[in-house]
Amino acid sequence: MSYTTAQMIQGIEGQVAAARVEATELERLQRGIEADVAKIDAEIDKAWTQLAETLIPAWDPAVFNRASTLLRLAPIAAAPIERRLQEHLVKAQETLQKLSSNLLVSDRENQVNVAQIRLAEIDEAVQPLQTSTTTLEDEPYFEELLAYRYGTEAYAVKFFQLLYYAHWKHADLVVEKHGKRLKVDSFADLAAKYVDEKTALKELLDGRHALNQRLALVQERARQVEEVQASITQAQPRTLALVRARVREHLAPLPDADVAALLGSLPDVDLAWRRIAGLKKKKEYLAALAAEQVKAPLAELQAFRTKLVADANKLQRPKNASRVWGAADWERRFGNDRVPKWQKRRERIQYTRQHIVEFHHYDRWNPVGDLLWWDVMSDGQLDGNFISEVRARPHHHVHHHHDDVGGSTFADVS
């Protein structure tokens, strides 16, 4: 059986389409793993909170001293904690006294009332002035007439200039339309009235701005007072929260073996920490899974698609237009259907991902044993070749998976 070049190109296009679909599926899988990692980050934060609250459940000098000794962390002992609390309360009380002596705070209610009454009066006065001046400004040529000082000795346009007659016409129209309202009968008087209104309007608006600034300052002082008062009333709970945060800050950078040595004497705290250790490993394993078994195949698929396009371009050269290809050529190029292998690979990745995410038995790991978290999570049933610490073990045997992504090219096509 023989095949035309057009049929060969069509076959390549089918391979390109299949590779594109596979890349889309892998990208979807990658996004899913990234979402898993984000959820685990949130779980880690909660786990740290649980550990700190388990270690220091309440404000108790004995609890502080026990935690300080256990963690070898002097700053969370009862004496320094109480000293920092008292120092904070003294400073906060001094700040509160200074703020309360300020008129913006002590006379706040009266200041707000006076400002609001004055603002209402200003708004009432501003409205007609804004309407009057804006109405004049909307008239054709009005601002130009003002700029040229029409109607005054400073007006320099001569009567024989065309602009003179335009100014004359529009000045008369403005006076005719607004003179009665403003009680004037000439443009010069109307312009003077406009300038007076504009000046009064600016003074009112400046006054309103100053009052609003003062009101904002009064509100800011009130906010500062509330903030200081809250820091006083909430001083103990906030200090307790800082102590717990200090526990995480102290433990987080330490190697697992060191943390195990510190917390092993308290079963409930030790279990809380194992949960953190396990969650961090889940995150690490998922990141490795994405890097080794998703990102790498995606790169291979891209290279494969690039090669396919190059092959198709070669086949489209004029000298290959009438070429006939044998069954062996077709079989070598298209006989191996990669789609089932790709699907199997994705299923294997998804199964591994699911196994990692759904693991919650953190008590099964022994920090002093030689089992990795992977051994506990996989129960020996999953290949961990994609994880560096698994590959590094002396007794580890690497299992290679040959997922035939590429394929032979048309070496004899040029």
Image (cartoon, rainbow, N blue to C red):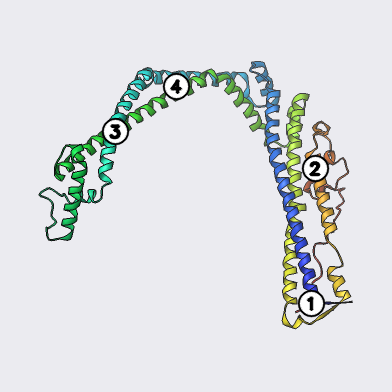
Does 25 sit above or below residue 355? below
Circle 1 is placed at which residue position?
5
- Disc marking residue 176: none
Asked if the residues shown at circle 4 and circle 1 are in contact, with their CB atoms under 8 angstroms apart, the answer is no
Q: Amino acid at mark 1?
A: Thr
- The crowd level at tag 4 (other Cα within 10 Å; few <14, some 14-19, many 20+) is many
Mark in front: 4 vs 1? 1
Q: Which residue is mark 2?
A: 354
Numbered disc 3: secondary structure: helix
Look at mark 3 in the image and give the residue it sits on: 126
- Looking at the image, which is closer to me, 97 or 258? 97
Q: Residue 4, image x and y in percent?
A: 81, 77
Q: Residue furthest right?
A: 1
* Local SS, label 1: helix
User: Which amino acid type is marked by label 3?
Assistant: Val
Q: Which mark is residue 225?
A: 4
Which dot, 3 or 1, sits closer to the camera?
A: 3
Image marks 3 and 4: residues in contact by CB distance under 8 Å: no
Callout 3 touching callout 2 (CB < 8 Å): no
Q: Residue at x 68, y 24 (%)?
A: 53
- Circles 3 and 1, Cβ within 8 Å, touching? The answer is no
Neighbours of disc 2 within 10 Å: few (<14), some (14-19), many (20+):
some
**Label 4, label 1: how many angstroms apart (C-alpha)?**
84 Å
Between the residue at mark 3 and the residue at mark 4, the CA separation in whole angstroms equals 34 Å
Which quadrant of the rendered structure holds the C terminus? bottom right
Give the answer, above or below, for where 135 lies relative to 81.
below
Mark 2 or 4 closer to N-term? 4
Residue 207 horizontal side relative to residue 385, left or right: left
